[in-house]
Amino acid sequence: MVFLSSLGGERLRSRFRLELPLHMMLLPGVIIVFIYHYLPMGGIIMAFENYVPTKGMFGSPWVGWDNFTYFFSLPDTHQVIRNTVVIAVLKIVFGLIVTIGMTLLLNEISKVWFKRSVQTLVYIPHFLSWIILGGILIDMLSPSEGIVNKVITGLGFGEIFFLGDNGWFPFTLVVSDIWKEFGFSTIVYLAALTSINPALYESAAIDGASHWRRMLHITLPGMLPIIVLMVTLSLGSVLNAGFEQVYVLLSPQVYESGDIIDTMVYRMGLQQMQYSAATAIGLFKSITSFLLIGTSYWLAYRFANYRIF
Amino acid sequence: MPNKSRRISIIGVSLVMLMSVIFTACSNNKGEPSTAPSSSAPSSSAEPSPSSSDSGSAAPSAGLPSKFDPPIQLTTAMANYSYTKFSDGETTDNNVYTNYIKDTYGIEVKAIWDVPFEQYEQKVNLMIASGEMPDFLAVSPSQFKQLYDAGSIADLTDIYEKYASDQTREIMDLAGAEVLESAKMKGRLMSIPWTGVAKEGVSILWIRKDWFEKFNLSAPQSMADVLKIAETFATQDPDGNGKPDTFGLGLYKELSENAMVGFLNGFHAYRDIWIKDADGKLVSGDIQPEMKTALAELQALYKNGWIDKEFGVKDIQKLEESIASGKVGMFFGNMGSAAAPLQQLTPENEWLPFAVPSVDSEPAKLQIPLNIFNYYWVVNKNAKHPEAIFPIIQTWLDMFYYNTSDELYTQYNYDSEQDIAHWMNAPIKIYKNKRAENHLAEIEVLNGGKDKTSLTPEQRNNLAGMEKYLAGDKKYWNVYYQDGPESSGKIAVEYLEKDMYQPTQFTGTPTPAMLQKKANLDKIRDQMILKVILGGSLDEFDKFVEQWKKLGGDEITAEVNEWFASTK
Amino acid sequence: MVERATWSRKLFLNFNYALLAFISFLCLFPIVQMIAISFSSGTAVASGRVTIFPVEFTTDAYRYVLRNKAFMDAVWVSVERVLLGCSLQMLLLVLIAYPLSKEVSAFRHRTLYVWFFMITILFSGGLVPTYLVIKNTGLLDSIWALVIPGAVPVFSVVLMLNFFRSLPKEMGEAAFIDGAGHWTTLIKIYIPLSKPGIATLLLFSVVGHWNSWFDGIIYMNSPSNYPLQSYLQSIVLMKQDSSALSVLDQSILANLSDRTLKSAQIGLGAFPILLVYPFLQKYFMKGIVLGSVKE
């Protein structure tokens, strides 16, 4: 027994020696993250108090769950949460489809100059702020003069008030967001493609597999880990429908379908800096994200024995 | 009454002050108080002769503390517009203002930080949270209340009595008694309000001159005339291109702006302010029946296609595009709309200003919020020399409002050659109305009653513009219609004389129920407004009123009246 | 390897080229309009007459901007920030992603560490406490306030560890048997093999640092220390509180909010970052990993 256990100790020690460099590599990052992210998390207690700057984080009166019950008791909270989830989920789903589709299409291009130019051009809108794009969208989507409606009426349909109609507004948000971001999102997938071994394509070609089958059986599976990862991470933003965009395009006319949590918090903030309510709502969003990401991580591990990250 | 005679002589210094006097009803000074001021007033190398004061002696103006020797140091925090405000080598702590204040009064002002206005309140909160506070700074009304509750700010009651200059007091009076009142807590003056110009920020109806003349219109006497003009502009093809592509009235999605509020006020409807009802109780303007009437008219305009069907999603930039492209010929703007944006949008087309007419025989009243420029100036309780803020205020007044020298203007206000806005460096600013004063002073000179040297450089500049306009250089129309004989400046005088204002009756800090519920009440109000204009049933308004009361409106009203009772 | 393209393949390829060209055009439109606006006269812009060609061509806006000291200063702060911030991020990125890319069998605590980092992108203490920590660690009003708190790009770490995982395992193991330690393996094998991944994440890092504006405004005490995007933000978002200002001040502000000028500044601000991509692009091309892995 003594012999065995000392052997175990020996193994542990050698294992520790083996893993020590790994710990050392992590150390600087752990320290920075601890100081600048974990220490401030103490501020989450503001969600449970009525924070007043002059009284400080630890001197403000404790109110328990009041900030949460306040948020959920507001008459429009349910509608706002529903709007947020609908817009965010549509953005995630269609954004993913468009981005992957774009990656696959680009992958089929063999002319290098063309591929490079397309990549560079679709990447541009990411760098323009919504304030700029907002003005352009109002012009393009205008029922009376906008080019989009000219096309629609040219095809014999009635004009659509994209920004003023509650039925169309979420759709407009989703499409314009994808337009702005898909080029930039494509980059990650293109990088993932580089790790696919070309030998696989070559042998498939020799076996006579069509381009379509090669895409289906080599390209897509090669991208799969990154796709799974990106989907999982995007679950974290189910309650983030994109403040800046919605703020720029929103008007009272479309509050019903377009008011989201963040714009609501913003309007509350205009009354006064309501740190506590904002922290409480932020905490609610964080916990939701955590549960969604944690669950998918656990499910992937449990059923596919795969660690997403 | 030595104080009074001193006051009279100071007032005599400039015509600007003359106007203040008229408005504060000291009519006995109307005559010819004194000679023109020496335009060689203070030079930057600063002999301590700061104010453009009467005797030319080195003594600071009424009541100001004498020069500190050795110099004292005061810290502050700055908020600014993103604009060039330094010449080469200058910094926040070393510029014409800080140097002047140091040389003249022995006060060194150091800013611990400087931030754009948009982030100012946020940054002050962070600073307070980190337990830091400069000697003096501007804070929002709720921060003011918090700092007072925390006992962090100095009581200014006595030092205001002792040290505030007459000009400072004058400006406080002009801003309205409720303004200084709102700076008091339990009867003690705990801050100096950053007075605003609410009375000159109210609506003016602007109409395109060529369209106005084309249809031989006369000045609108009532809202019915306005609606009639809207119809004409929308249906009679004012631009003569044969297409029905013009609108009667310019509107855009921000319902809180003059474009909308001016229209509402014409119907005695008031958005987002508190008014007194027949029983002397405070009620919210949002839920009064006048609102319904005004909205019904807007609904009709919309239905007829006389306002842009897409106004509900368009921002101001889009309205400006419509104005510039000649689709809109009438809108409710402000007293400065001619200078910006109209001059840039339609440099060739002149616009005429009109006072907001009323729907009935009762003159329209223009709603104004509490007349502060968002902030109160507070002094740290631990500051050794709280009275030092008064010379700093005086510096601002001397340089920005009362200076008559061109040289000083370039140096301390705005250097047009190098495009530097020096005035932004003043550590303390308080604002006062000046459109009415400018108008009267300039007109008097224009009519030959006065000499040019009595004017401030800004007024002289305007006068020059008007003279060029009258000599046929039409590109100066904007100055002419803001300051000339038939200008928005003249309307400013009319508004003041007839007291055509509806100030909000609630000037306290937000009540608990407001903090919790007002955001949502505002949302349903704006939703209702849009719904009704866009053709919804007028019952929507009644439904809204009911909902408003239920969802916290009644509670807020009770709190507001409680506050009201406490101020009596 | 020559392949005979089938009829349907040709059709698809033609369609593909056309579609991508069309999509590129859609993405090009806003920037073309912005450039057109920046070269047009203020009046033409205000009346909405500019679409894709400049109207009443002028270069005034650019001359103004390039003369404007504040703008040029801000550019330098941004450059400094990007250089410092990205070096630090990339260093920590590989240092963190490498251990975390190990299986639990090789590094028992990896999952603990992964979640330690993940938590920080899900939960945040908010602005006030973060500000207090930054202040108390003495970073306030220095370039480090923009660099150190965000030095660990967790999102990129997670991507990077996935890139590392997609490398053939045998390589690392082979190196290990040859007596190389973790450090050598990381530097000699993992990093050279992951160039596409690193290039991608470097791009994210550069873009992230270049585009952040809020921290600059909050942590810097004076606008003269603002990075470019903070400076631009303070101009673009500037509200025109016209009611409070005199005729003159109003026209000053109108001048500033001039869309021509804004467009020129935003355009110049985005230009460097648009150049970074084509430069890094060559690393995204296929086959780099292969060269060394081919059995």
Image (cartoon, coloured by chain):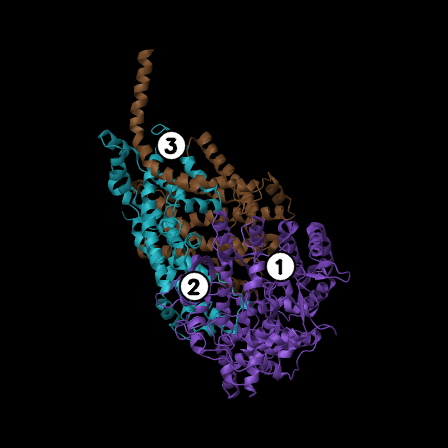
Chain colours: A brown, B purple, C cyan
Looking at the image, can residue B481 be seen?
no
**Amino acid type, label 2:** Gly
Which label is found at residue B106? Answer: 2
Q: Gap in Å between the C-alphas at discs 2 and 1?
A: 31 Å
Screen quadrant of the C terminus of chain B: bottom right
Q: Residue B410 sits in which quadrant?
A: bottom left
Name the residue: 48% across, 71% down. Answer: B59
Say which of B473 and A299 sits in front. Answer: B473
Residue C217 coordinates in the image, percent (x, y): 43, 55
The chain letter under disc 3 is C
Disc 1 target residue: B182
Vertical comparison of C90 with C42: above or below: above
Q: Position of residue A144 (x, y in %)?
A: 57, 67
**Which quadrant, please, contains the N terminus of chain B?**
bottom right
The amino acid on which the numbered mark 1 sits, given as a three-letter code, is Ser
Per the rendering, the mark at residue C110 is: 3
Pinpoint the chain carrying mark 1: B
Count every numbered label the image shows and give the total.
Answer: 3
Q: As displayed, is residue B120 above or below residue B61? A: above
Left or right of C284 on screen, residue A42? right
- Asked if residue B33 lies left or right of residue B395, the reply is right
**Which element carries disc 3, helix, strand or loop?**
helix
Name the one closer to the observer, B47 or A59.
B47
In the rendered structure, the answer to whether residue A38 lies left or right of residue B207 reads left
- Amino acid type, mark 3: Arg
Frontmost of labels 1 and 3 is 1
Q: Is residue B330 left or right of residue A184?
A: right
Q: Nearer the viewer, mark 2 or mark 1?
A: 2
Question: In the orientation shown, which residue stands out farthest toward the left?
Answer: C178
The chain identifier of the residue carrying mark 2 reads B
